[in-house]
Amino acid sequence: MAIYELKDKHVLITGAASGIGKELSRCFAREGAQCILCAHPSEAIKLMEFSEELRSTYGVKTWSFAEDLAEEEGPDKLYHQIKERIQVIDVLVNNAGLIVYGDFHQMDITRQIRLVHVNIRALMELMHLYLQEMMARGEGRILNISSVSAFQPTVHHAVYGASKAFVQSLSEAVNEEVRRSGVRVCTINPSYTNTPLIKGGDFPERLWWYSISGLSDPAVIAKKGIEAFKKGKSLYIPGVKNWVIHILLQRISSRKLINYISYYALKSRL
């Protein structure tokens, strides 16, 4: 498959103010893509400053939009705000996400529902809106930032893992539906990454799992992920070790054993 050229493509990235989304935005700009950046309103100033940094550093056009994707009308409002200024989005990067750490029955249900709104509903709605346009043109790419958490239950942050399982299943199914259209749906599936998502709040400073998997650098994940995306990989797990743990071992181990390991490996390490 030919390398997908990003120069002059219009790329929309959600959750672009920090973490993997910010590093992906930097990679896209380095490739010459015109970047449409989106983040939560609380990050509006930071997003505008980053937008200007990309513009001055790489000589690309940038736009910034602040929208709360957890709100009922958030995804639709974002879509129409962008439509007023940019007619065609060539690449949609669904990166925005939330995490809630703690046993399901003990955690505030409102926070967990908000997670579902961002990780699932907003992603699905934006994907649906832009996929229709891409299909009509016969060209386009959707990149959903999933996780290795999509491949097994994540005990102690159960809703997060479940949301990534949804994203993974949806992405793979839709990619198969559109495979003859000129449109592709891809996922990047990193392990735990050193981003604000798992810093502060109720997420522990360290998990037992980090002693096995380590904690990835978002810049490295973005750089490797962009290369896989350009090559047309529909699913990319950074690192051979992660592929062995989350794909190979899943196939040869019992569900009971996987759940048992998850319970202890994802506990806080004091």
Image (cartoon, rainbow, N blue to C red):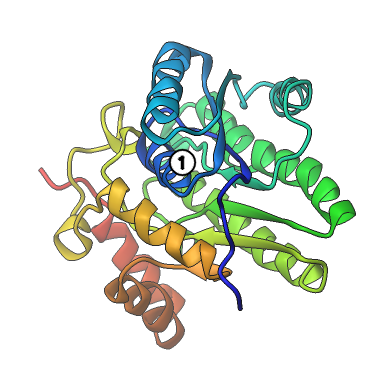
Say what amino acid the circle numbered 1 marks: Ala
For the C terminus, the quadrant is top left
Residue 102 in view: no
Query: Which class describes the residues within 10 Å of circle 1: few (<14), some (14-19), or many (20+)?
Result: many
Percent from the top left, x then y, of residue 208? Answer: 18, 55
Please give the name of the residue rendered at 30% of the width and 26% of the height, measured from the top-left corner: 201
Please give the name of the residue rendered at 31% of the width and 47% of the height, measured from the top-left corner: 218
Along the line of sight, the residue nearer the viewer: 43 or 209: 43
Q: Which residue lies furthest to the right in this view?
A: 136
Side of 265 relative to 211 (left or right): right
Please give the name of the residue rendered at 63% of the width and 43% of the height, measured from the top-left corner: 120
Percent from the top left, x then y, of residue 8? Answer: 60, 44
Please give the name of the residue rendered at 58% of the width and 53% of the height, measured from the top-left corner: 143
Along the line of sight, the residue nearer the viewer: 124 or 34: 34
Along the line of sight, the residue nearer the viewer: 216 or 10: 10
Percent from the top left, x then y, of residue 32? Answer: 50, 45
Q: In this view, does 225 lie above or below 123?
A: below
Quadrant in the rendering for residue 184: bottom right
For the N terminus, the quadrant is bottom right
